[in-house]
């Protein structure tokens, strides 16, 4: 004799789906650690890139002072100017910064006109476009006008 088929519902698929959901609920928080580590590493890389670019800007400005494209009169006027180096400006834009620098003498104005040696403060300010914050880097630069400026040394200097 044949027994009539009962309406038996199969819950196997539903049980498997619930089991997978429970496993995911347990596993997903462990991935958060790796996500946080990745974010922190990205921040450290960004800070290192910023520091590296500031050092390159500093070297470029020292070269301009050495070649006398930035005059002492400009420094005396305490000018502030945006950084204009083409290569470095592209790199700054890639990581989302704008650079502004300023130069000023640390000694009094009376001593500046007669002195041969100066201590100048260079402040490089990077403004972060993404976070609306700015970072100041301060350097002290020693400038020696020497015999050439006062025409006291040999003529071929």
Image (spheres, rainbow, N blue to C red):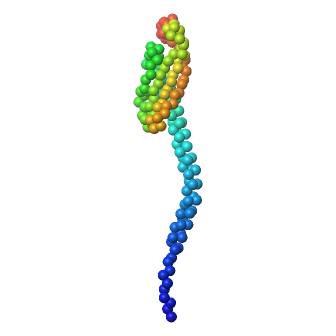
Say which of 31 and 68 sits in front. 31
Lateral position of residue 14 relative to residue 85, left or right: right
Lateral position of residue 143 relative to residue 87, left or right: right
**What is the x, y in percent for residue 60?**
47, 25
Say which of 141 and 129 sits in front. 129
**What is the x, y in percent for residue 88?**
45, 31
Q: How many callouts does the rendering have?
A: 0
Above or below, comparing residue 150 to residue 122 in the picture: above
Say which of 113 and 131 sits in front. 131
Residue at the limit of the structure toward the bottom, as seen here: 1
| Residue 79 sits in quarter | top left
Can I make out residue 97 in this image? yes
Q: Which residue appears at 56% of the width and 63% of the height?
A: 22
Q: Which residue appears at 41% of the width and 30% of the height?
A: 86
Q: Which residue appears at 43% of the width and 23% of the height?
A: 81
Say which of 64 and 25 sits in front. 25
Q: Which residue appears at 47% of the width and 37% of the height?
A: 131
Can I make out residue 88 in this image? no
**What is the x, y in percent for residue 15?**
54, 70
Residue at the limit of the structure toward the top, as seen here: 152
**What is the x, y in percent for residue 93?**
43, 35
Above or below, comparing residue 117 to residue 60 in the picture: above
């Amino acid at each position: 004799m044949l027994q009539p088929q009962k309406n038996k519902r199969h819950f196997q698929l539903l049980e498997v789906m619930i089991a997978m959901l429970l496993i995911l609920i347990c596993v997903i928080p462990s991935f958060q650690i790796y996500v946080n580590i990745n974010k922190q590493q990205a921040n450290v890389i960004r800070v290192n890139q910023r520091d590296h670019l500031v050092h390159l800007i500093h070297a470029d400005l020292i070269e301009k002072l050495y070649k006398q494209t930035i005059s002492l009169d400009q420094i005396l006027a305490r000018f502030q100017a945006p950084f204009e180096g083409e290569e470095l400006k592209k790199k700054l834009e890639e990581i989302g910064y704008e650079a502004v620098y300023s130069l000023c003498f640390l000694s009094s104005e009376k001593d500046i006109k007669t002195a041969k040696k100066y201590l100048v403060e260079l402040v490089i300010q990077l403004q972060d476009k993404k976070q609306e914050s700015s970072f100041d880097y301060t350097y002290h630069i020693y400038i020696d006008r020497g015999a050439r400026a006062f025409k006291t040394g040999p003529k071929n200097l």
